[in-house]
Image (spheres, coloured by chain):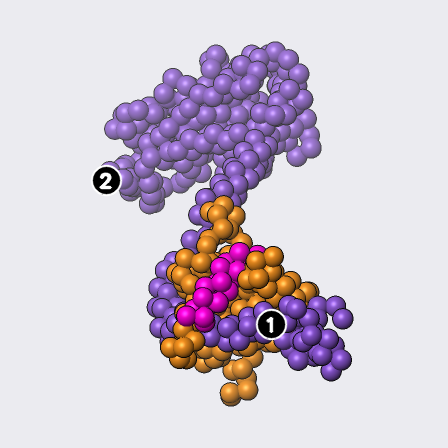
């Protein structure tokens, strides 16, 4: 029975498993682009509702990329509609600082990094953060974005390059 | 250095020499710092369980809701279907023949497309095609009717018993069960009965009772008596008289101990029931009993 159920996203258990495995990444994925928790939360809701509505048409194997595609489209639509680029910076990422000695230097560098991240193009920032925070492999990010691994490597390379340039003030 | 070496470096894919070269570069220190600092980066908290519950709530909400996708589109679809049906019905009805029916105790005057007049006697029916009227003046008759035909092409009255063809005249056609009678009041009428044609000049009548052709007789009146709210008979079996009485007065006739084949000559009123009953019973020497919508004719 269980193997049969695995074939259908409409099964609550299968759906729940897909949700648990991917929702956080979808959330982060949109958050890195928007810099807005609310929008990211909405995107997760929308993307998985769409998946549920079309659960009969999407196989569990395709479900993951389906959700990312929907979330990404939502993001693009919002960008288009609001005609603004949401500032990733408004709520800077939390950082844990290990020791007081580091604090000054570390926090200084952290601020620089945050600012540099803010000024990155959405795509590069998203790729960089997905890799650094979520530990996503290039191949996984490529699947999310529907791009080749090489394209993601290029983004990563450019992201690092411009981060350094921003931080070093070149 | 290979392409996208920064990405490769993060992934630990640089060769030793490449790595050494990279480490020697001026930029390396900052890259290493970025790498180090990025380890401390965190994303906001996300409660997956809460989000899943929220989705499940929305699912049940959506499931119980009647999904109305594009109600206007649905309306258009219905409207289109209705329009097609209406057009279809319009064309269908347009090609259908015109039909006029009279009930018991009812007569009706109908004007044909060429201004010919038809007066339908009780319990009768005519049909004709208005579309083809110009090509053929053709009327199907069931029952009894008086025709005043305007001059023009051949005018045909079809009945189950036979066909009557004229050019322009006034005549009466009776086609009842077992009785087929044509009375010509003006002009010339040709009657086809059993593939045999009979010319009927004004003042003559042609009558078939139970398949027997009765010799034509002189007709004195200018129009059938029923147009004057009377039913006249000349040597007609009593059963046809009683049937006509049923039709004119919307009443059910029963007979007992009487010879319904005896010939009747006379007239009864189509409006006064009492008078009509007397008109039928007295000459035939029979009696009648009226009970609501039934009348019993009986002999002794």
Residue A68 pos. (x, y %): 55, 66
Of circles 2 and 1, the one toward us is 1
Q: Is residue A40 above or below residue B19?
A: above
Q: Position of residue B42 (x, y in %)?
A: 45, 72
Residue closest to the eye, A98 or A67:
A98
In depth, the one of B116 and B228 nearer the eye is B116
Read off the chain for label 1.
Answer: B
Is B45 displayed left or right of A61 in the figure? Answer: left
For the C terminus of chain B, give its image quadrant.
Answer: top left
Q: In the depicted view, which residue is nearer to us: A138 or B258?
A: A138
The disc placed on residue B292 is 2
Q: Residue at x 53, y 25 (%)?
A: B173
Q: Is residue B210 magenta?
A: no
Please tell me whether mark 1 sits on a helix, a strand or a loop: helix
How many neighbours does mark 2 have within 10 angstroms: few (below 14), some (14-19), or many (20 or more)?
A: few
Chain B: colour as depicted? purple
Q: Callout 2: residue from which chain?
A: B
Q: Quadrant of the N terminus of chain B?
A: bottom right
Query: Residue at the spot x=49%, y=59% of the render?
Result: A115
Q: Secondary structure at mark 2?
A: loop
Chain A tint in image? orange
Q: Is residue A89 visible?
A: yes
Q: Which residues are magenta?
A: A104-121
Q: Which mark is residue B29?
A: 1
């Amino acid at each position: 029975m269980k193997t049969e159920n695995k074939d259908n996203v409409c099964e609550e258990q299968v759906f729940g498993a897909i949700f648990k495995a991917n929702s956080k990444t979808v959330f982060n994925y949109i958050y890195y682009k928007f810099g807005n928790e609310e929008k990211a939360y909405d995107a997760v809701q929308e993307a998985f509702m769409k998946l549920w509505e079309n659960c009969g048409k999407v196989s569990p194997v395709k479900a993951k990329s389906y959700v990312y595609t929907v979330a990404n489209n939502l993001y693009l639509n919002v960008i288009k509609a609001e005609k603004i680029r949401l500032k990733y910076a408004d709520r800077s990422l939390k950082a844990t600082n290990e020791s007081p000695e580091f604090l000054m230097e570390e926090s200084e560098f952290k601020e620089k990094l945050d600012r540099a991240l803010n000024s990155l193009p959405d795509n590069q920032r998203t790729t960089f953060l997905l890799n650094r925070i979520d530990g996503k492999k290039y191949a996984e990010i490529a699947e999310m974005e529907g791009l080749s691994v090489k394209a993601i490597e290029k983004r990563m390379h450019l992201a690092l390059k411009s981060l350094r340039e921003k931080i070093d003030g070149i | 250095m290979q392409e996208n070496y920064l990405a490769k470096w993060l992934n630990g894919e640089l060769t030793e020499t490449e790595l050494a070269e990279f480490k020697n570069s001026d930029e390396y220190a900052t890259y290493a710092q970025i790498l180090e600092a990025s380890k401390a980066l965190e994303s906001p908290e996300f409660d997956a369980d809460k989000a899943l519950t929220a989705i499940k709530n929305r699912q049940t909400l959506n499931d119980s809701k009647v999904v109305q996708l594009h109600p206007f589109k649905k309306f258009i679809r219905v409207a289109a279907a209705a329009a097609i049906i209406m057009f279809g019905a319009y064309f269908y009805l347009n090609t259908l023949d015109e039909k006029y029916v009279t009930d018991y105790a009812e007569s009706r005057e109908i004007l044909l497309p060429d201004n010919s007049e038809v007066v339908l006697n009780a319990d009768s029916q005519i049909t004709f095609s208005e579309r083809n009227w110009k090509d053929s003046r053709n009327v199907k008759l069931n029952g009894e009717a008086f025709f005043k035909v305007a001059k023009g092409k051949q005018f045909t009255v079809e009945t189950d018993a036979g066909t009557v063809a004229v050019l322009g005249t006034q005549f009466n056609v009776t086609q009842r069960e077992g009785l087929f009678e044509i009375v010509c009041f003006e002009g010339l009428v040709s009657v086809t009965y059993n593939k045999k044609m009979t010319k009927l000049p004004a003042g003559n009548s042609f009558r078939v009772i139970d398949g027997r052709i009765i010799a034509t007789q002189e007709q004195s009146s200018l129009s059938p008596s029923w147009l004057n709210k009377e039913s006249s008979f000349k040597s007609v079996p009593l059963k046809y008289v009683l049937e006509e009485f049923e039709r004119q007065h919307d009443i059910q006739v029963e007979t007992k101990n009487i010879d319904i084949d005896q010939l009747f000559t006379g007239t009864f009123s189509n409006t006064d029931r009492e008078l009509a009953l007397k008109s039928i019973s007295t000459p035939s020497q029979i009696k009648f009993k009226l009970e609501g919508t039934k009348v019993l004719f009986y002999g002794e």
